[in-house]
Amino acid sequence: TNRTFTMIKPDAVKNGHIGGILDKITSAGFKIVAMKYTQLSKRDAQEFYAVHNERPFFGELVDFMSSGPIVAAILEKDNAVEDFRALIGATNPADAAEGTIRKLYATSIGENAVHGSDSDENAALEGAFHFAGREIF
Ligand code: GTP
Ligand code: MG
């Protein structure tokens, strides 16, 4: 489909990068169709990242993602999922290409500034996790 889901993670919010990241996103041609400033509870984070619950870093990931406010958004563009993952760069900012959001704004593999859905199916599920139909434009 033409939609993906993103979060500006607690590290990037704390470090003052909401504006810079939204500018990169809209400058790359993504249209914001839903957006909110919110905080995940520990339980929300466990549910959102349930696919990772066997990974060794799951506890750290849940604690980090619930540690402060985030910006959640649904983005629209042709080829949204793939193009957005290219825009954010590799999971580990040390491996992220020049000019990508993680290269510019992430601090470590755990605190890596942004989330981007990895498939159309997950984009739809993740968007529905955060937004009611009437909040999507
Ligand atoms: P997301 O867009 O956030 O889903 O990142 P990704 O798809 O590039 O990576 P993946 O889905 O494999 O991992 C999800 C998230 O778990 C990452 O974005 C990191 O925040 C975190 N993570 C991944 N690997 C590690 C790790 O080795 N240590 C820690 N602390 N966190 C990790
Ligand atoms: Mg992922």
Image (cartoon, helix red, strand yellow):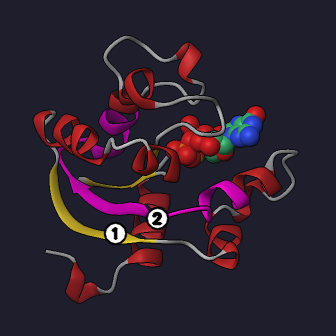
Residue at the spot x=36%, y=44% of the render?
A: 81
Q: Mark 1 or mark 2: name the one nearer the start of the chain.
A: 1
Q: Amino acid at mark 1?
A: Tyr
Residue beneath the point at 43% across and 20% down: 103
Residue 26 left/right relative to 116:
left
Counting from the top left corner in percent of width and height, residue 35 is at: 26, 67
Q: How many numbered discs sit on the rendered protein?
A: 2
Asked where in the image residue 30 lies, by quadrant, the reply is top left
Specify the segment rendered in magenta. Answer: 62-85
Q: Which residue is mark 2?
A: 69
Q: Is residue 71 magenta?
A: yes
Q: Nearer the viewer, residue 9 or 79?
A: 9
Quadrant assignment, res 95: top right
Where does ligand 2 appear, by image quarter? top right
Residue linked to disc 1: 37
Q: Residue at x 23, y 69 (%)?
A: 34
Amino acid type of the residue tagged 2 in the rendering: Pro
Contact flag, marks 1 and 2 (Cβ < 8 Å)? yes
| Of 59 and 132, the residue lying toward us | 59
Residue 72 screen position, x and y as percent: 37, 63
Residue 127 numbered mark, or none: none
Front position in the image: 29 or 27: 27
Residue 39 vertical placement versus 120 (above, below)? below
